[in-house]
Amino acid sequence: MSKKNNLLLSSIMCSLILGMSAAPVSAETIETFNLDEMIVESSRNHKTPLPGGFNNDSSRVGLLGETEVIKAPFTVQSITEDTVSKMAMPNQDLDTVLSNVPAIRTGTSPIKTDFSIRGIATNASSYLVNNIPGFFIMATGPITNTVGSIDAMVGPAATLNGSTPSFQAGGISGATPGAIYLNTKRAGENDFIKYTQTFGGHGDYGEYLDISQRFGKDRNIGVRIYGQYDDGGLAISGAGQRKKNLFANISYEGETTKTNVFGGYYDQKLMGTERRFALDSSATKFPDAPDNKMSFDDPNVMHQDSNGYMLTLNHQKKLSENVNWFVNAGMNQTIVRRFIYNSEFTIDENGNVMGAGAYPWSDYIDLQNQYLQTGLKGDFMTGMAKHNVAVSVDRSHRKYYKTGKNRDDLGTTGNIYTGLHFKPGIYEADEATSLQKRLNQEETIVSLNFMDKIEIGKFTLVGAVSRRHGDYLPGYGPKTGKEGPNYKKELKDSNWAPTYGLSYAPTENLSFYAAQSTARNRGSFVDDSKALNNNDFLDATKLKSTEFGIKAKPNENLSMSIAYFDMTQPNTLNTYSTTEPKKYWVSNNGKNRFKGVDFSLDAKLADKWNTFGGFEWLNAKQEVTSDKRFEGLPTHGSVKWSGVWGLEYKPDEDTSFTSRLSYTGEGKFVHSKTARVLDIPSHVTLDLFASHKTNINGVPVKFIAACYNVANDSHWIAQTGQPNKFMLNNPRSFMLSAEFEF
């Protein structure tokens, strides 16, 4: 069948499946304590959706706890559980719903978790599960079917999170530009047993079980168990996945105590998903994107296998009328065995693979993380000022084992438009299962955290500070498997991370705010043989942010916010010697600057019509660099204009049809060797969603359909913060699910 006919057929199928649709989940209310809810989230707590129903009017972020979005002195977006269920199908990555946040640009690789917040790179390390950090890295991500609502905090969040591990941005940015809080699914008021089947347009089948039950005299014990089995092909040619998991969430709500426990095990496999590229220095223009369905590795041998467990505990005890004691704890282990390419394919402007191409790489990763936080929260009055104070101490301990083996004798040749050629030896080169376990790094962080939210009339002042003490221990090199020059050389550092925010609310539906925050990471050793200070210790990096904004809810049908931000990010700087021209000192005195405007909107346009969306304008520049040719140039992968717009039609309470347009403007590709700036073409992506709730033979059934990248547009996406690197977007794919409730 021709490409044209395939496109026509796929478009028809996408249109047909959008004839099915589901009723939104209703919110419930419960009795609450006098104190502000802080740590333990229950699905029985009342959360009111903003106009349109896509986002909530309150969010839960770190020590600040439950806070009205309109009164929070920073940018935050709380995505509802209903939105997550419709836009992030359980066999999809959370990228499919995080793209609703105007300040976030998501990646497109099933094997990588890179994304950016206000132009600054991060990855799945920015996720917190039930307020517990440190569960994920660039190679691992959340289990989608465990996620209920999502709170996305935009801007440095280290002070509100405590001892976040320094692996936060995978070494890309040095300090986190935000935080994504994942709230796991909890038992609600209604008991149910749900069985769901999913089907993807490329032979992917899934089965899901979801059981929710409340127990006790006052039904104050909630148990929710959910599991997944999914197996089949992805939209990328030849690529596939297999996902298995089983999780449970147990919650208790007493008169003075609230407890939530979440845990489970997962096992998943990805095949043939490598789509990373770099541009050769000879290129004077950006090459056209190839067919996005093409595979650029061999799905028969290239894979990533991961398995592990995760466990979280959130406990809150009311000690008196005005004081709560709380505990947050968690632990996890993730083991990854993979056979992938060790780097990107370097191509020229005509799509030819340059040099020997990318080499296959056998990789072993073992991530172990433990986290404990305890503290007190209370409220009191001083004159006219109401204080809501939290003080906590926390400890994060992480061990990261990594061993790899490179096969530089097995390069690739070819062209991205006509296909790549692999050396036959690749089929016997996978040694991932036999690699030895070697410690790459160990890190222990202890933080003392203090926060005071002061309310005086129409003013709210939030002040927070974190004192961080880090202990970092390097191990074996992941590629050499040998002791490096800093092997078990203990690195200790201590630093402060303050946050200040002030809001003025002349009415309940209007607020003006200003905020300043700092996020810090651990220091690092210089690892450069040409550096005069090789093996020396550099102080912790620091990400500073200043933000001004307005939030308004003019009426019950409209909510919107706009914010101006100015962030500075440290960068490595080489200062050359006057006596030894080829030698230099390495420091963290370089600087990138990110200035811009975020705008977001939620609205009920008319009866049966809802919308959400927003845009970001970003001016990202390299201000201080080692090579003066780069000063004043854009940061790599930055985009000046981007936006998202969603429109929903709800003919009745049981049916909805939603379209989402995502726009990414012209991106800037800055070559790290030539300082040549090339334009990455802009692109628009259309996604369609539908849901419908009905009854078949007395059994409630909910149908959900999704079609991603409806037009099957092929385009490049630059990897923000990673020079020369870019990725190919995912092809059109459609999903259909049927949920049966018993």
Image (cartoon, helix red, strand yellow):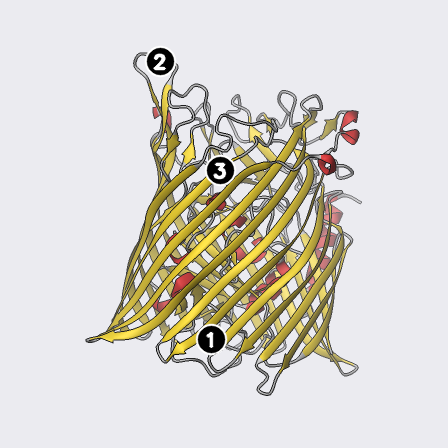
| Residue 17 found in image quarter | bottom right
**Can you give x and y, in whole percent of width and height, for residue 706 in the image?**
65, 60
- The three-letter amino acid code for the residue at tag 3 is Leu
In the image as oriented, which residue stretches furthest toward the bottom? 217
Instruction: Let me know if residue 576 appears in the view.
Output: yes
Q: Nearer the viewer, mark 2 or mark 3?
A: 3
Near mark 3 (Cα within 10 A), the count class, few <14, some 14-19 or many ≥20, is some
| Residue 348 found in image quarter | top right
**Can you give x and y, in whole percent of width and height, for residue 278 in the image?**
56, 30
**CA–CA distance in space, label 2 to label 3:** 33 Å
**Can you give x and y, in whole percent of width and height, for residue 427 in the image?**
79, 31
First-in-chain label (2 vs 3): 3
Residue labelled with disc 2: 581
First-in-chain label (2 vs 1): 1
Q: Nearer the viewer, mark 3 or mark 1?
A: 3
Which of the numbered marks, if any, corresponds to residue 48? 1
Which of the numbered marks, if any, corresponds to residue 473? 3
Q: Secondary structure at mark 1?
A: loop
Q: Nearer the viewer, residue 384 or 180?
A: 384
Q: Secondary structure at mark 2?
A: loop
Figure quadrant of the N terminus: top right
656 vs 302: above or below: below
Q: Nearer the viewer, residue 725 or 290?
A: 725
Would residue 142 be found to the left or right of residue 210 on screen?
left
Near mark 2 (Cα within 10 A), the count class, few <14, some 14-19 or many ≥20, is few
681 vs 217: above or below: above
562 vs 491: above or below: below
- The three-letter amino acid code for the residue at tag 1 is Thr
